[in-house]
Image (spheres, rainbow, N blue to C red):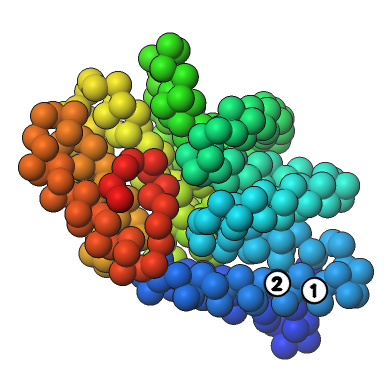
Amino acid sequence: MPDRAGVQEYPWLQQISRGWKAYQKSFSSGREQASEALSFFVGAAETLRDSEDMENLPLALDGMGAALHLLGTHEDLLRAEKCYDEEMKLLDRAGNVQELTQAVSSEQAVLRDLALLAPESAFVHLEKGLKLADRGITLAAKMRDEKSLAWVSQTTADLCCVLARIDSLYAGSHLDVAVDLYEKAAILWDRVAARGRPRKTNSAGAAASRRKPARPQAGAAPGEAAEGKTLGLLGMAEAYIMQGKNLDAARILLDGARDFYLKAGPGSYQMGHVESLYGGLCLAEGDRDRAFGHFENAAGIFRRLGFTLDRGGDTWK
């Protein structure tokens, strides 16, 4: 693949670059930027298909999947799933194991949100996501790729949290597994950070160089390890809230995430999610008035940005 110096020589690469810039802006500017990002990625994909460039087509498909995931309607998510399916097929054919492993986590994030939006087919989406987990974890472990293993562990944990919502009989077991995976991911992120080689993310969690987690990342995030760990600890806080225990620990985790994401601005997408989880925490603590205030704050942020789906799965609407 050409480097940045080749952007002018390869129009499709320029489109992808512009797509990620628009995508990053969407987390603070809103839905219109995500739609613009999608148009750039679609244009790149069309160019690559016309030239039968199957080697670089996964880069455009990855961007399309990320933008569609963020747009977040049921139809958008189904289209994102197809993008990631095609991307993984091409990467598998090319033997690009590292990118394939990271693509697993991207599709898991989409399947998680499909399960939240379409409860009648939730088990189908969750089953597919958990099967992908087996493959992703196996590949990442074989390559000793701790970054990919951390992402897949977290998105698998996210799936377990959704499973706990719909499988009440075994909810406790699902949440225990989720917490264990979040803890393992946090250890992996510490190792990545200690090596001092965090890979810069192209976007809120989706991209040719990063692969997105269950929830998009801010373009202003200082590094993949810090961003990844913060996302995982947010997931752990959500699991604690669902369990109704370790609530003090959940608040500490949310406070840390709030401080981290305030760097992207008080009205960013990520802060909407944090506010929503604060609402869930207050409900678990029995403080309905404070919970309502946090849910209203979250709703206001998502409404201003034009997004309707809270990736945390909490009911704030």
Considering every residue shown, the one lying at the far front of the view is 120
When the figure is inspected, residue 52 is found, relative to residue 281, above or below; the finding is below
* Relative to 22, 82 lies left or right: right
> Residue 47: x percent and y percent?
81, 77
Does residue 194 appear anywhere in the picture? Answer: no
296 or 96, which lies in front? Answer: 296
Label 1 vs label 2: CA separation?
Answer: 6 Å
* Relative to 176, 287 lies left or right: left
Which residue appears at 26% of the width and 55% of the height? Answer: 298
Residue 42's disc number: 2
> Residue 158: x percent and y percent?
47, 34
158 or 289, which lies in front? Answer: 289
Which residue appears at 40% of the width and 71% of the height? Answer: 30
What residue would you read off at disc 1? Answer: 46
* Relative to 61, 174 lies left or right: left
Q: Are marks 1 and 2 in contact (CB under 8 Å)?
A: yes
When the figure is inspected, residue 294 is found, relative to residue 235, above or below; the finding is below
Does residue 50 appear anywhere in the picture? Answer: yes
- Disc 2 marks a residue whose amino acid type is Val
Which residue appears at 78% of the width and 52% of the height? Answer: 86
Which residue appears at 48% of the width and 75% of the height? Answer: 33
> Residue 102: x percent and y percent?
64, 46
Quarter of the figure with residue 300: bottom left
Dot 1: within a 10 Å radius of its alpha carbon, few (fewer than 14), some, or many (20 or more) residues? some
Q: Secondary structure at mark 1?
A: helix
Q: Secondary structure at mark 2?
A: helix
Dot 2: within a 10 Å radius of its alpha carbon, few (fewer than 14), some, or many (20 or more) residues? many
199 or 171, which lies in front? Answer: 171
Residue 59's disc number: none
- Disc 1 marks a residue whose amino acid type is Glu
